[in-house]
Image (tube, coloured by chain):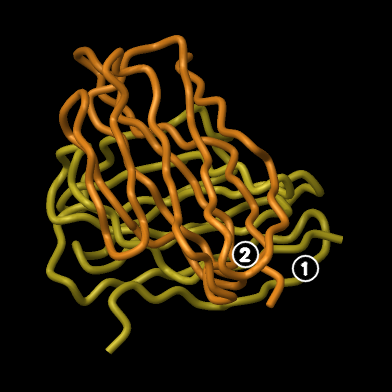
Chain colours: A orange, B yellow
Amino acid sequence: GQQLNQSPQSMFIQEGEDVSMNCTSSSIFNTWLWYKQEPGEGPVLLIALYKAGELTSNGRLTAQFGITRKDSFLNISASIPSDVGIYFCAGITQGGSEKLVFGKGTKLTVNP
Amino acid sequence: DTAVSQTPKYLVTQMGNDKSIKCEQNLGHDTMYWYKQDSKKFLKIMFSYNNKELIINETVPNRFSPKSPDKAHLNLHINSLELGDSAVYFCASSQDMAVADTQYFGPGTRLTVL
């Protein structure tokens, strides 16, 4: 089945640094979504991307839908301690039987 | 005014027992889901229901039986619990069954099978 390769698996950064994470796949996706999960909570949608090449921002977060439709990245600028959490990419597969597939997450730790 | 709520938040039980997890959404959504998140944080869909009807059943053992008494509730009953069932189970809902609809997740139920 379709798989998403999300990297890095974890990141340890200093407050104020910029962060970049990405998801790739051998399959084409119609939609890319980025979620954040904080400890003890469910995932919350951050950004949704619907067109190849689309670049969307949400505050300090910026995400792009890759031109090939097989990848997406998420950048966080000027990180702050409350950015801590697990960030998941998710993609909606192309074709008759659409599915939402999640990446394995990037665990972000921000040191004050 | 929690949008998607689950009970209980934690569930510890012995192997072989039967247990249920409840989910309610007050968003007026038509579609609800159950996901399993394993110890490595991998999220995998188990079921989805639209207006009380089963839409997706992703090769989940038949010990897992979802029940939707109305479109605001989707409960998950698990029979004969096994060690490998230990995970965090998330309920989610979306406006309708289009896959691209934004899904809103509950806070999760951490199930530990001893």
Q: Residue B13 carries which label?
A: 1
What residue do we see at 39% from left, 69% from top? B23
Report the amino acid beneath label 1. Answer: Thr
Q: Do labels 1 and 2 share a chain?
A: yes
Residue at position x 28%, y 76% from top?
B3
Q: Which chain carries label 2?
A: B
The mark that comes first in sequence, 1 or 2, is: 1
Which residue carries the number 2 mark? B19
Q: Is residue A70 above or below residue A61?
A: above
Instruction: Report the front residue among A57 and B40.
Output: A57
The front one of A110 and A35 is: A110
Near-viewer residue (A44 or A109) = A109
Q: Which residue is drawn at 16% across and 28% down?
A: A51
Circle 1 sits in a helix, a strand or a loop, which is it?
strand
Farthest residue to the right: give it.
Answer: B114
- Mark 1, Cα crowd under 10 Å, few <14 / some 14-19 / many 20+, is some
Mark 2: secondary structure: strand
Q: The C terminus of chain B lies in which quarter of the figure?
A: bottom right
Q: How crowded is mark 2: few (under 14 residues within 10 Å), some or many (20 or more)?
A: some
In percent of width and height, residue A40 lies at 60, 72
Label 2 is placed on what type of residue? Lys
In the image, residue A87 above or below residue A22: below
